[in-house]
Image (cartoon, rainbow, N blue to C red):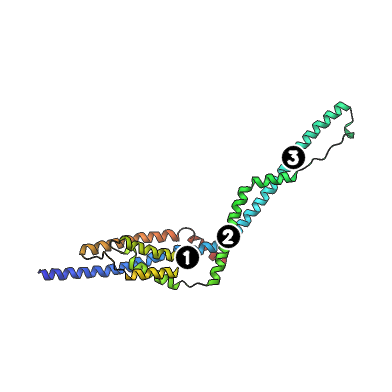
Amino acid sequence: MTEAQNNAKNDEYIDSLKDEISYLKEIMASKLFEEDNLINFTCREIETDYSLKFGVYKYKIKEYKIKIKKTKRTIELIKKMVNQQSSNQFNKEISDLEENQLKINKTKINKPKINMSEIESHIENEFKEEVLELETETAKVNILIEEHKNNLSKKQDFKELHSIYKDCIRKIHPDLLLEPTDYEENLFYSSKEAYEDRDLEELKSTQNLISRHKIENEPKTVEDFEKLRNKLEINIELEDKEISNIVNSKPYTQQKFLLDTKK
């Protein structure tokens, strides 16, 4: 085989690797976007909906339980106070009877005095931590309700945000590059942060920088192309596991409870 034939065969193999890499990049880019979309949109919305539907009931139930516990404890303290006063009064009356030789039926028995302000103060202090925890939970739910109202009023369309972020992933995600530089990694994570913050203008600005940037370490040799192909195959498997972990854990799994309430 001549050198020209070897070169032609080598070029043909590189072309086949390029096609394979292009195909794998599309799969990987799609999975990377799916993961970020699940985390930053789907799961956040499920978490908000779940808190709005069930969080209110949760803290209401907790509120009632604390009230019941407070009432029971108040009764216990009243009984304890009455018993202590009765015991002291009984001992005093017996002493008076022996000393004055009076008849029992003529003895005055004082009615126990209940200091409710003292009991209430004790109860408030005893349940202070539980009440504070309840107030914190209530505040969180109220914040979610306000955020939900604001989002409904804005009716923001995220189609453009999603589209631009997909483009950023395809062009410069470190998992799609042979050997990404620090600058390229920083560029991508800037786009990721803007996407997470739902900041369309910042994302557009970063996309502009990405579009003007030329990837520094493009594959050139057969070894480079094979290395990138192998990297993509491994990353696709890892990404599948990441996505599986998300859809099989909270808050994503709480979606079934939300669907049940709509039936």
Q: Up-down: is 168 above or below 103? A: below
Identify the image quadrant of residue 50: bottom right
Query: How many numbered tags mark residues here?
Result: 3
Q: Is residue 66 above or below residue 229?
A: above
Crowding at mark 2 (Cα within 10 Å: few <14, some 14-19, many 20+): many
User: Which residue is disc 1 drawn over?
Assistant: 42
Is the C-beta separation of discs 1 and 2 under 8 Å? Answer: no
Q: Earlier in the sequence, mark 2 or mark 3?
A: 3
For marks 3 and 1, the one nearer the N-term is 1
Amino acid on which disc 3 is placed: Met
Taking 94 as reference, is 120 left or right? left
Q: Quadrant of the N terminus?
A: bottom left
At x 83% / y 28%, what residue is drawn? Answer: 95
Q: CA distance from mark 3 to mark 1?
A: 56 Å
What amino acid type is highlighted by mark number 1?
Thr
Task: For label 1, count other residues whose C-alpha is less than 10 Å away and answer few (under 14), some (14-19) or many (20+).
Answer: some
Q: Mark 2 — residue? A: 141
Q: Residue at x 74, y 45 (%)?
A: 116
Real-space Cα separation, disc 2 to disc 3, in angstroms = 40 Å
Please name the amino acid that badge 2 sits on.
Val
Q: Nearer the viewer, residue 116 or 72?
A: 116
State the SS at label 3: helix
Is residue 263 in sight in this rendering? no
Give whichever of 95, 194 is nearer the camera: 194
Position of residue 91 measured from the top left corner of the image (x, y, whole percent) = 80, 31
* Badge 1 element: helix
